[in-house]
Image (cartoon, rainbow, N blue to C red):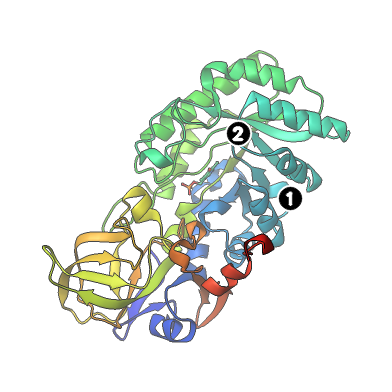
Amino acid sequence: MDHFQPTDGVLHAEQVSLEKIAADVGTPVYVYSRATLERHAKIFREALSPLGDPLIAFAVKANPNLAVLKVLQRQGFGADVVSGGELMRALAAGMPPGKIVFSGVGKTDAELSLGLDKAIGQFNIESREEGRELAALAAARGEEAQACLRINPDVDAKTHAKISTGKAENKFGVPLTHAREAFAELAALDGMNLRGVAIHIGSQLGDLEPLETAFAKVGKLVDDLRSTGHTITHVDLGGGLGVPYRKGEILPSPAEYGELVARASKGWDVQLTFEPGRLIAGNAGVLLTRVVRVKRGGNGPPFLIVDAAMNDLARPALYGAWHDFDAVKPTGERMMANIVGPICETGDTFATDRDCDALAAGDLGVFRTAGAYGATMASSYNSRGFVAEVLVDGDKYAVVADRIDAGAIMDAERVPDWLE
Ligand SMILES: *Cc1c(COP(=O)(O)O)cnc(C)c1O
């Protein structure tokens, strides 16, 4: 459930009309709902409540906006970060360093050092090489890095290939077959407190079975590591739960996920960490856009040309992803349309042969479920600038990210004098 519902025939975010936001801020614009973010945060925490007091580290890459992070920080969430930039954002939002987990296969020395400087709670190490580097950096400072070893469990998460992360051929984690050896080597290093294991098998998971398989492998590994004398106090089970992108689509619920985790982790006796991203933010945001014009006369249905494009919302172009598209002020009439943006690529297509609310030039519409992997993936392709973001809270709203126009981007560029 989300808080983007019609009132008096006009779609609202909580109590704020999307017509008002479009008029005040312009389009395209991302609109987030605080109540929806909080609702999702609470439901997820509730579902995990039988597991003691796990660390819930929001996957910042899903939506790194500072105001969004602040909402979640106030819910007691920590952060899962995958770059120095995300680490700085989590800290800027007030997340305690101890609740920050640093994941990613390509952390540079500078990023590892930044994590040590800030005394973050956990590094998730993705290779032996990275583990050696981290241990050396920490030892040189007379410190110990708190770390888990990320395992690649070689399970098929049954999701889109580009967001599957737990198969043997994916770049993430240490193969389970080498995990014991790698753990023994790294745990013995000065500067390293290797205290557990981590996994994250993929995103937009629509089926719990791959998670169940992966969790069972983690449990077996924890037993094996303990039987060879290692102390295991932490397990990080990652994120990945999918969200409905189409009206009526049914996905595993947080409650079902919580039951699965409780079953699978029975007897582990560890501090658990979770890294949800999409589940928390996905349905808490829409991309509000205005129809530029309706172009008729091709072979198929008319092109509904909107002012948002693939640079603002990349998921359809990147993954062939579906986003429901609804009018802000529906008339009750329907149309068939190809919904496209203005960018000069055929890939700039949001939907083909879509049965949607009838819209004309100047009308407003929303792409739903755009709160995760939306604005964060934006680019300035076609010199379109970066889209603005708004957070609604009850009957008020604030612009939480300014639109960065093409001129501001051009200001960061220079023509060297030897070209003048
Ligand atoms: C992307 C990512 C997540 C979040 O995935 P969601 O599908 O958004 O829940 C969690 N952990 C890691 C390591 C990630 O890379």
Residue drawn at 76 percent across, 46 percent down: 114
Give above or below for 128 relative to 326. Answer: above
Please, which residue is most extreme toward the right here?
142
- Secondary structure beneath dot 1 equals helix
**Which quarter shows the N terminus?**
bottom left
Mark 1: amino acid: Pro
Q: Where is residue 42 in the image (x, y as percent from the top left)?
A: 52, 58
Marks 2/1 in contact by CB < 8 Å: the verdict is no
Q: Please state if 370 lies on the left or on the right of 218 as rendered.
A: left
Residue 247 can be seen, yes or no:
no
Q: Is mark 2 within 8 Å of ligand 1?
A: no
Residue 231 in sight: yes
- Figure quadrant of residue 26: bottom left
> In this orientation, which residue lies closer to the viewer: 138 or 217?
138
Task: Mark 2 vs mark 1: give the one in front.
Answer: 1
Q: In this view, does 139 lie above or below 114?
A: above
Residue 219 at x, y percent in the picture:
53, 25
Residue 4 position within the rendered picture, expressed as x and y whole percent measured from the top left: 38, 72
**What numbered label is drawn on residue 235?**
2
Furthest residue to the top?
228
Residue 294 found in image quarter = bottom left
15 in relation to 255, above or below:
below
Residue occupying image coordinates x 59% and y 49%: 56
C-alpha separation, residue under disc 2 versus residue under disc 1: 18 Å
Of mark 2 and mark 1, the one earlier in the sequence is 1
Task: Tell me: is circle 1 under 8 Å from ligand 1.
Answer: no
| The disc label shown at residue 119, or none | none
Does residue 97 appear to the left or right of 297 in the view shown?
right
The crowding category of the residue bearing disc 2, from other C-alpha atoms within 10 Å (few below 14, some 14 to 19, many at least 20), is many
Please tell me whether mark 2 sits on a helix, a strand or a loop.
Answer: strand
Q: Where is residue 373 in the image (x, y as percent from the top left)?
A: 46, 55
Marking on residue 97: 1
